[in-house]
Amino acid sequence: MVEVAVIARKSLHGELVSLLRDMILDGELKPGDKIPEQALCARFGVSRTPLREATKVLASEGLVQLLPSRGAMVARITNAEIEELFPIMGALEGLAGELACKQATEAEVAAIRAMHDEMVGCYRRNEYAAYAKLNRAIHEAFFTAARSPVLSNYFGNLIVRTHAIRFVARKSLERWREAVEDHEKMMAALEARDGHLLGELLREHLRHKIGMVNEAMAALSSMEAAE
């Protein structure tokens, strides 16, 4: 009976970590937001103890900042971290694109095409939240198709480091159009199985992201200063 209780506790703990991580990565909890303990306990039907244990795990990943006597908040990313990490992510994504062109099945390419077309539809309808989720799913699909667990693990660690800002930071209309154009070219390269081109496009796409994220962070800082 003791062994079952331990397993159940570990399962609950892991599930809470996963749920909170997804809320941050999907932008439901944004950088600078305080973790709403009472609301989350009610939402997930748990006490504060496992929730706080989960936030400690996320703090060790850099997603959450623990505030002495004040709970926890979603960690912010700095401009210096963006300048350092995004080129590394671009290199990883470029390699994933090259490998995906060699390894992806026709079914995987078709699935990525379907996500891409749906994402473009969201762009045209100005549905930013749905667009952002599909955007993230497409980039993750390149790594799945690359068939390299080690590469995927490195990517996953960096996604945690850069957390929600990459996929949910609001783009200007010009930056949004630029991102969609990047994806159109990337999709064509994947379908042509042109690994060299797709790799270059992905690296360039991440260079574009640096400017977009810096602009979004500057806009957020201006809004907060005005409040």
Image: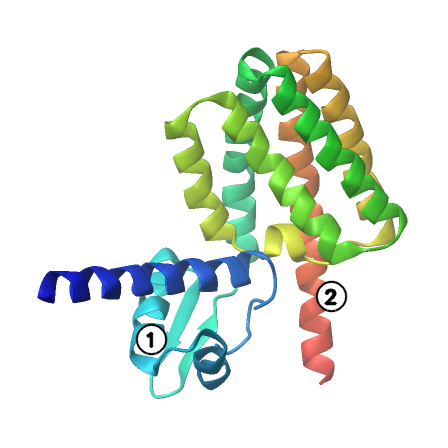
**CB contact under 8 Å: marks 1 and 2:** no
Name the residue: 41% across, 70% down: 65
Q: Position of residue 225 (x, y in %)?
A: 69, 80
Name the residue: 57% across, 25% down: 94
Q: Residue furthest right?
A: 124
Name the residue: 74% across, 25% down: 187
Answer left or right for 177 relative to 149: right
Q: Position of residue 84 (x, y in %)?
A: 50, 44
Viewer-proximal residue among 94 and 108: 108
Q: Residue furthest bottom?
A: 69
Residue type at tag 1? Arg
Number of other residues with Cα within 10 Å of mark 2, as a class: few under 14, some 14 to 19, many 20 or more: some
Q: Position of residue 55 (x, y in %)?
A: 37, 69
**Residue picked out by circle 1:** 52
Q: Residue furthest left?
A: 2
Answer left or right for 125 relative to 161: right
Judged from the image, the secondary structure of the residue bearing numbered disc 2 is helix
Judged from the image, the secondary structure of the residue bearing numbered disc 1 is helix
Give the number of marks: 2
Disc with the residue nearer the chain's start (1 vs 2): 1
Determine if residue 64 is in view. Answer: yes
Which quadrant of the figure has residue 64?
A: bottom left
**Residue picked out by circle 2:** 219
Q: Position of residue 219 (x, y in %)?
A: 73, 66
Answer left or right for 206 relative to 226: left
Viewer-proximal residue among 141 and 5: 5
Q: Residue furthest front?
A: 1
> Could you tell me which quadrant the N terminus lies in?
bottom left
Please name the colour scheme applied to the rendered image.
rainbow
Residue type at tag 2? Ala
